[in-house]
Amino acid sequence: MRHLPAVAAVLAAAQTAPLLQVHGRAATTGAIRSALADARAELGAGSGAVPSMDALIESARAHLENQPARLRPLFNLTGTVLHTNLGRALLAEAAIEAATEAMRHPVALEYDLDEGGRGERDDHVRELLRALTGAEDATIVNNNAAAVLLCLNTFALGRGAIVSRGELIEIGGAFRMPDIMARAGAEMREVGTTNRTHLTDYRNAIDERTGLILKVHTSNYRIQGFTAEVSARDLAAMAGAAGIPLLNDLGSGSLVDLSAYGLAREATVRQAVDEGAHLVTFSGDKLLGGPQAGFIVGSRDAIAAINQNPLKRALRVDKIRLAAIEATLRLYRDPDRLAERLPTLRFLARSQDAIAAQGARLRDPVAACLGDDFQVDVGPCHSQVGSGALPLDTLPSAALQVRAKGSQRSLEDLSAALRALPRPVIGRITDGALQFDLRCLAETDEALFLANFAGRA
Ligand SMILES: *Cc1c(COP(=O)(O)O)cnc(C)c1O
C-alpha cells in the first residue's frame, strides 16, 4: 500500500486535468480519494497489484460519471396506474411546458397584471376551479393531506370535529384520520358504528363546542353488507341548519364523469359541491392527473377563513406546480380531448385488446433479450387505478409473464437486475411469474423499452 500515490500526486497528474475541467476540484478530489480507498481495499483483500496512475484516474472518472440520478425515470409496469411510490400521475405536455416556463422566467405569481399591484397566487386558478366545480371559491395547498389538516385546524382548533366511525380511514404512508385530527388541534368526536351511522348520531353529537362535521370518502375500502351511511346531501342540510360547516374529503375526486372513459363512476367534485358541503377537498395527482397538490373548494366565507389561517402560508404551493395546475385545469375545458392529453386518463382508458397487441409485439424481442433461462408469454391480467381511487374496480389488461425455467431465485435475480437498469423496469412477481402489465407503457416508448432491456446483459 506504500506504493499507492498520494491524493495530491494523482490530482497533479496531467491525465487528471480533463476531470478537473469538467467536475471541478472538490468533486475530483473526492473521487480520487474513493479510487484510492477502493485500491487499498483490494490490496488489503490480497487481490490484484498496485494500480497504475492511469488505472487510478480511470477509477476516479468512473466514480464521477457512473452515478445515475437516484430519482430517475423508470417504467411502471406494476399494473397500478396511480402508484403512490412511483410518483402517481404523469403530467400532460401542456403542464410540463407551463412548469418549465415558470422555472425559467419570472411569472406574475402574486402580482396583478391589470392593476400593477399585489395579487394572490390563487387568482390564477380560482376562476377555472369555480367553472369546473361550481364552487364559490377555491384555494390550493401542498397536497390533500394538507388540505384536510388546514380545514380542520381552521374550523376545529380546540373544538370538536364530528366523524363517523365507518370513515376513520388510513391512507398508506401514515395518513390516519384520527392522527391528522389530533395534530390539527381538533377533538375527534366519533359517532355511529363501523358499519352503520345515522343522521341522528351526528345530530346528537352536536354541542356548543362543535367546530366542524367531517365526511370522508372511504377511498381505499368499502364496507359492505348491513350498512348505513348518511348522504352528504342530508348531512350538509343538517350541518347548515346547525350553523356548522361540513367538510367532504373526497380523496381522489374527479372533475369529469369517468364512465365516459369506460371507468367506474366516481363522484365528481361538482356533485359534492352541489350536495351542499361547505368545503370539499381532493388531490391534484390522483385521478385529476396533475402535480401533487391539495384543492379546497367551497363557500366564499369558508375559503376566506382558511386563507386567514397562518398555517396556509406553510402549506402553499410554489410557482412551478401552480403553473402546471393551471395548464392541467385548462385541459378540462375540452373534455372530448382529455383522454388524448392527460397521460393518466389515457393509460386508464386503454383497451385490453390494444395492450394485448402491444404484448404480442414485444414478446419475441424481450424473450430474445432474456435468453434460454426464461419463458416469456403474453397473458391477461388486471390493472388497478391505485392511490385509493376506485378500490374495488380493476381494469382488464395484458402482461408479459416471465417464468424461470430453473429456480424461483433466478426470477428474483432477474427482477433485481431489471430494477438496476439505466431506466429501471418495475414489475411484480405473482403466481410464480414476473409480470409486466403493459397498460402504462406508452406505444411511443416501446423502442426505448426494448433498447433498455437489451442493455441487461
Ligand atoms: C389520498 C387521500 C388523502 C391524501 O391525499 P394526498 O394528496 O395523498 O395528500 C386524503 N383523504 C383521502 C380520502 C384520500 O383518498
Image (cartoon, helix red, strand yellow):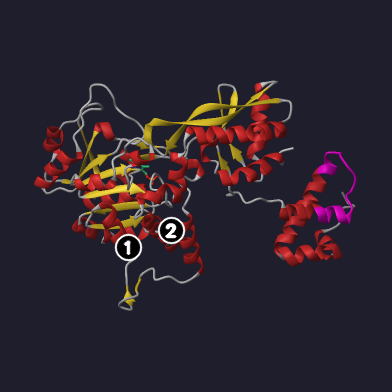
Instruction: Residue 153 in the image: state x and y as whole percent.
Output: 27, 51
Instruction: Residue 365 in the image: state x and y as whole percent.
Output: 68, 35
Residue 436 lies in what quarter of the image? top right
Q: Is residue 184 visible?
A: no
Quick check: 379 above or below 152? above
* Labelled disc at residue 289: none
Assign ligand 1 to one image quadrant.
top left
Amino acid bearing label 2 = Ala
What residue is pinned by disc 1? Answer: 122
Is the Cβ of the residue at disc 1 closer than 8 Å to that at disc 2? no
Q: Residue at x 75, y 67 (%)?
A: 21
Residues shaded magenta = 42-58
Residue 14 lies in what quarter of the image? bottom right
Q: Residues within 10 Å of mark 1 (few under 14, many from 20)?
A: some
Residue 233 highlighted magenta (yes or no): no
Q: Residues within 10 Å of mark 2 (few under 14, many from 20)?
A: many
What residue is pinned by disc 2? Answer: 324
- Dot 2: element: helix
Q: Residue at x 28, y 24 (%)?
A: 224
Residue 344 lies in what quarter of the image? top left
